[in-house]
Image (cartoon, rainbow, N blue to C red):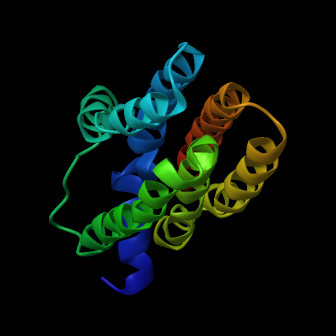
Amino acid sequence: MNLEDLRIDCAIKQKKGIHFISASIVIWFFVLIVQALDLPILTKNLFTFCCTAPLLPLAFLISKFLKIPFQDKTNPLNNLGILFSINQMLYLLIAMWVYPTVPEKMLMVIAMIFGAHLLPYSWLYKSKTYMIMSIIIPFASLIVGCTSTRWVLAMMMIVIEIIFTVLLTIENKTILR
């Protein structure tokens, strides 16, 4: 298979990573709950980091429900998708620095990192949705994070992730035609 065939195969078999985006809806819901609690900001930040931990198990469960192979070793580009995800872990070092330094902006930084890390998936999955969301999420997070409450930012992320999932569902139907 040539590169384009591998990309299309990856997009079809992995359903453009919809199981991860769907899992992020749950993660942002957990974050929203944390933001609604009456706790000190540093405690909220710690719990927010903890909320991100179940992403892989949730994505795995959703992949089983949607009948998406969680690991497809037949396509070498799937390793590239894993590399894109690991790349986000390096960016989380920025959020760890923000945690004690500018604690009220940590959630905004996490949302911006999440959105920005999606950009390479637009290439991998041949997806306009990933391209658009990788731009909208960081800018919307910056604007809302600087002008509103952390609770509103978490709500915005839930809404964006739901829209993202719907758009990926539409893209997935289109690619199968």
Q: Which residue sits at x=42%, y=50%?
A: 17
Which residue: 57% across, 68% down? 119
161 left or right of 24 in image: right
Residue 101 coordinates in the image, percent (x, y): 53, 55
Q: Which quadrant does the N terminus fall into? A: bottom left
Q: Is residue 22 left or right of residue 138?
A: left
- Residue lying at 46% horizontally and 23% vertically, measured from the top left: 30
46 horizontally vs 32: left or right? left
**The quarter of the displayed image where residue 87 is located:** bottom left
Q: Residue furthest bottom?
A: 2
Vertical relation: 119 (above or below) 161: below
In the rendered image, residue 31, in percent from the top left (x then y), is placed at 50, 28
- With respect to residue 80, does 158 lie above or below? above
Position of residue 55 measured from the top left corner of the image (x, y, whole percent): 33, 38
Q: Nearer the viewer, residue 86 or 45?
A: 45
Res. 18 visible in picture: yes
Q: How many marks?
A: 0
Q: Residue at x 40, y 63 (%)?
A: 93
How far across and down, in percent of the image, does residue 92 sit?
42, 59
For the question of whether residue 177 can be seen, the reply is no
